[in-house]
Each structure stands twice: as C-alpha cells, then as structure tokens.
Amino acid sequence: MLAHFRAFLKSFLPEMGGFLVILSVSLLAVSFYFGEQRPERWIALSLMLILLGVSVIAEINTWWVQRPWLRHVFILLLMVLIVALMLLPPQYGFYALLFFVLSGTVPMLFRRRVWLAYIVSFALITAVVLYITDGFAGLITSFIYAGGYYFFASFATVTARAQAAQAESQKLLEELQAANLQLQDYAGRVEELAVAEERNRLAREMHDTLGHRLTVAAVQLEGAQRLIALDADRAAAMVGTVREQVLEALGELRRTVATLRAPVEVDLSLPTALQRLAGAFQEATGIAVHLDIVEPAPRLPDPQRLALYRALQEGLTNVQRHADADQVWVQLARQNGSVILQVGDNGAGLPVDVRYKGFGLRGLEERAHQLGGTLSLAPRSGGGAELTLQLPLSLEGGDDA
C-alpha cells in the first residue's frame, strides 16, 4: 500500500504543481479582495475560477494537444486572464507569478523558437504592467520575473528530456529483457538440437562399427554351422574368425564409447585401413574384393577419412546382405578436386523403386552432406549395384598419412 501511495505522489505532484501555484495565488488574492471588501472582488473571483477551471479541464482532456492551433488558443486565453487580473484594481503585482506556470507549460507544447517567443511575451507583458502600476521600480522588478520565466522554461525542458530518456531507457530495458528471454529459448533449442545430433552421430558410429562386425560374424557362424558335420576343422577355423571379429567389435565399442573415434583415425592410414577391411571381408565371406587405390593417396582430414572408411564398411555389408554377388570392385580415386570412393558388385542389382531405407545408408548420406559431398546408389555398368561417395578435397597432394 505504501509503495502504491509513493508511486501516486511521484506521478501526481509534478502535474499538480501548476494547479497549486494558481490555487495559492487565487487564495492570496481572495483574502486581499474580500478582506478589504473591494468592489472588484467578485470579478477577481470569477476570473480566478475561470483560470483554474480552464487549467483543470485542459489537463483532464488532452485531445487539444494534438491540434497546434488549440495549443496557442489555450496559452493565449490564460495570458488574457492573467493580464486582466494584473490590471484589475488595485493591480496586484503578484499575479505575475501565474506566468511561471505558463513558462513551465509552453516548452511542453511548442518547439524552442515558439516557446522562447512566449517567454519574451510574458516578460514584456510583466514589464509593461509593472511599469504602469509601480513605475520604474516595477520595471526593475520585471527583470527578476523575466529571469524566473526563462529558468522555469529551461527547467521544464531539461525535465522533459530526462523523462523522455528514462522512458526510452525503460523501453530498451524491456526490449533487452525480451531479447534475453528469446536468447534463452534459442539456447535451449540449440542444446536440444546438439543432443539430437550427438545421438544421431552415436547411432551412426554404433551401426558402422558393431553392425559391420556382427554381420560378418553372423555370416561366419552360419557357414560354421553348416560345416560342422562335413568339415570340422574348417568350421573351427571359421568360429575362430568369428571370435576375432567379436573381439574387434568389443574393442571398437569401447573406443566409441570412450572417445567416439574409429581405428582409421587413431592408428592406420586410409589405404591400409581400406585394405585390411577388404581383406577381412573377403576372408570372412569368400566374396572376392578387387581393390584399386590411387597413388599417392590424397591427404585428408580425419572426418573425411572416417567417412570413406564407413562407406566401404556399409557397401561391403550391403553386398553380403542383399547383393547375392561373388565379386566386389572397390576404387578410391581423385578427380576434379574431389576424392571418390566406389563400391560395385556383380550381384542382383537394385529394384526400380529403390530408396535409402536402411539406417546405414541414411547415416552415410548425412555424413556426406555434412562434409559438403554426395552419396549415390545406382545400377552398375555390367550388372549389379554401385555405391559412390564423393567428398571435396581439403588438402591436395602427398600421401595419406
């Protein structure tokens, strides 16, 4: 309650200051007129009531402020009333105090040149009236009033500027608060997107590592199961190969969880990694892999090397799952500022309405787009299908390290 009362006083008192001055002067004049029983007392009372009433109505209904000519009418009407009171016998000079109220009002209504003209008018009117009533002494006194008029006008101007600056600061503060809330919202969304992106990356890593290893292991176990009765030694060898694949898968799982890095990034050059991958696939499946790597191999950043490695993994895995092929051709080439990996087979080929439905191909396509490259799966010339990954070269020349 106290805070509301203080806010009321803060907004009410500056606006009522002019009314208080008019009321104080009016009460002083009434005490003189009616105390001396002067015949002009009712005229003076009427003029003061009109002056106070016009001021109150103008403050309550501010529509006239939007019309420049009505502003002049309002000020001129008050000037006429004040001059009439100053000239009304016995010509009390203290009515000039009412010009202080107008001096604080005109800067709020007009441009600087206009309100300065009004201040000069107030000073001249005061000088003329005081000279008529008090002679040379009144003329000297009018200079004091003139200085007061200008002071009140300047003070009102500074106050108005301060209020405008405060309002602008408040507006900027509100906009800043709104922008801060927006930024917080955006930060939350960015964090959610980052989490989703990291989950997708983890899913791709798990698919590309464990998926490939487990697919090869499943093929080996199927072969071993069929050979147990016919060739126990070969079946045992295949089970041993599966064990190695599972151990490698466990190792890659640990590395993925710990550092999210692939073996191609840590230990091996890209050609060596591709050769080992192709050799392991050929040994596990019996499908012949023909590897053709450009010499010297391009020098590539880790994300591109990993993408090429994963592309070969996915291509070989799909050949085993879907192609029904016995030959695979893998080519790593450099052409027109790009590095291109192609994995083709002589299998059954692609359906007419083939789509990237598998998670592995979708993950590869995402990797390619993130690196500014492209991924395509199309029929191979001579039969079968061909997976092509094209990535822009970041660094030219030199062997792949």
Image (cartoon, rainbow, N blue to C red):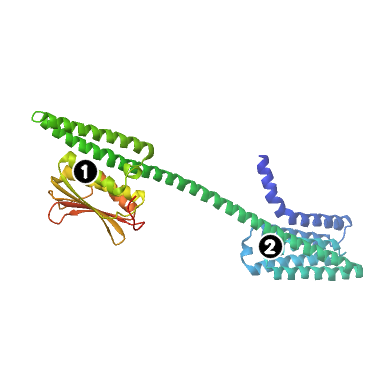
* Category of crowding for the residue at label 2, using alpha-carbon neighbours closer than 10 angstroms: few (below 14), some (14–19), many (at least 20): some
Q: Nearer the viewer, residue 356 or 245?
A: 245
Task: In the rendered view, tell whether residue 244 sits above or below residue 273.
Answer: above
Task: In the rendered view, tell whether residue 94 sits above or below residue 3.
Answer: below
Quarter of the figure with residue 95: bottom right
Q: Which residue is drawn at 39% across and 45% down?
A: 193
**Residue 358 seen by the camera:** no
Q: Residue at x 81, y 54 (%)?
A: 27
On the image, the x and y values in percent for residue 129 come to: 84, 69
Circle nearer the N terminus (1, 2)? 2
* Category of crowding for the residue at label 1, using alpha-carbon neighbours closer than 10 angstroms: few (below 14), some (14–19), many (at least 20): some
Q: Is 204 left or right of 32, judged from the image as shown?
A: left
Q: Which residue is drawn at 58% across and 54% down?
A: 172
**Residue 295 seen by the camera:** yes
On the image, the x and y values in percent for residue 156 come to: 72, 60
Q: Residue at x 74, y 57 (%)?
A: 18
Three-letter residue code for mark 1: Gly
Check residue 92 in the rendering and tell me which mark sits there, or answer none: none
Task: In the rendered view, tell whether residue 130 sits above or below residue 283.
Answer: below
Task: Kindly state the secondary structure of the residue where label 2 is placed.
Answer: helix
Q: Is 327 left or right of 122, judged from the image as shown?
A: left
Q: Is 347 left or right of 112, judged from the image as shown?
A: left
Quarter of the figure with residue 48: bottom right
On the image, the x and y values in percent for residue 294 come to: 26, 55
Q: Quadrant of the N terminus?
A: top right
Three-letter residue code for mark 2: Met
On the image, the x and y values in percent for residue 236 come to: 16, 30
Task: Kindly state the secondary structure of the residue where label 1 is placed.
Answer: helix
Disc number lying in front (1 or 2): 1
Residue assigned mark 2: 108
Residue assigned mark 1: 279
